[in-house]
Amino acid sequence: MTRTDIHHALGLHMHQPPGNLRLLIDANPWEAEEIIRCYERVPRYARQYRDVARFHVGFSGVLLEQLLDPEIVDRYRRIVDIPAMLERYREADNIEQIGMGYYHPIFPLIPRADWSEQLASGRMLMERVFGRTPRGFWPPEMAFTMGMIPALVQAGYDYVVVDGVHVRPADGISDVFRPYIACHDGVCITVVPRDRDVSNAQESGLNPRWFRDEVLCRTAGSPRPDEKRLITTWSDGENGGWFRQTHEPSGFFGHFFAPYMEQVRAGTCPIIPVRLGDYLGRVTPSAHAQVQTGAWNVGSTSGEDLSQWAGSARQREAAAEVAKLSARYWQLVRCLRDAARNGGDALARARRLILEAETSCFLCWGDSWIPHLHARTREASLALDEAEVALARRLPPDATGLRLGGLAE
């Protein structure tokens, strides 16, 4: 019997660390071209297969910030017209935009006081660029903890995609082919499990026949084969030779996606591409689950913990330095009325540097990228010193509580 109730949510994650597009076009123009063409292909194929294609695409705020930079637009103009590309994303109603933190932070590893700003600023920029409010959230590096749920709901998100290996259904039956409800402190959100195995294939190379056979086999052997099945696959959209392949017939879009869509269009594929916003509007989850704190698998790590970003002493020390500076900033803001206004540019500069230092990339590559983090924390500390001096000058003579280098205990 041909199955007609297997649905596929395909997601692509797009991110570049601060300043990377400029660095690449200066130091490695060929790699820069490979990457920028990855962003351009998505709306082109979405338009070509508008009747059947369904995508989910998440851009980090810091990547969008670079794509909006007039200098970047000018430097990449000979390769891609970036404003026209962004407009095609805006016009593509079969692309569902997915939110992320602005600076792509590992949320479980950064101060909770910074969560709301990372969430709100990333969401607002996506709304401005694409003209749509994202309903779903993709945690950077798939690093998720249950404590994020109230912050996500408060930010306006309806659902979050998590790595399926971390989902613990209340009934004890592991089933990654259905959405769940997850609750924390009385606040609930829909959780969509990502299928890790098929996502790994999406990231490295697959063909439509293998995909169809694998999905049919896996859903037939799932705990609820006669129910509606949702397979969610998610990967980076601009990393690895498979996506960066400039000979399109040999890469993701030419070798897999286009023939997959041709089969869907012809009615010969039993798998139905969907947007999660649409699917969850029709299939309301009722089963509950907990989600174990973890991330996706990076390199040789399993993602069962956060060791890729906090496994070494230097990584932990760097994260602690960011947390210390964040606490210092918030103490200033809490203790001094109108601190943000009276602190001037220095306080705003410190805030940006602290949030930027929370970028996951600075911790992802062992100890090698930690100097990028320290460059920001050093500047943030100096900016906080400057802000404190400016604020102290505005205090009455008998006021106490401020000292250079931080608030007094």
Image (cartoon, grey):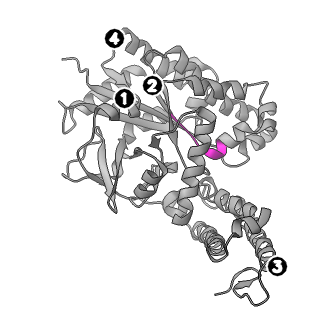
Q: Amino acid at mark 2?
A: Arg
Judge left or right: residue 186 versus residue 240.
Answer: left
**Secondary structure beneath label 3:** helix
Q: Residue furthest top?
A: 266
Distance, label 1 to label 4, CA atoms, is 15 Å
- Identify which residue is drawn at 47% across, 28% down: 55
Where does the image place residue 407, in percent across and percent down from the top left? 68, 82
* Precedes in sequence: disc 4 or disc 2: 2
Q: Nearer the viewer, residue 364 or 69?
A: 69
The residue beneath circle 2 is: 54
Report the label total. 4
> Callout 3: few (<14), some (14-19), or many (20+) C-alpha neighbours within 10 Å?
few
Q: Which residues are magenta?
A: 57-63
**Secondary structure beneath label 2:** loop
The residue beneath circle 1 is: 8
**Secondary structure beneath label 4:** loop
The residue beneath circle 4 is: 267
Q: Amino acid at mark 1?
A: His
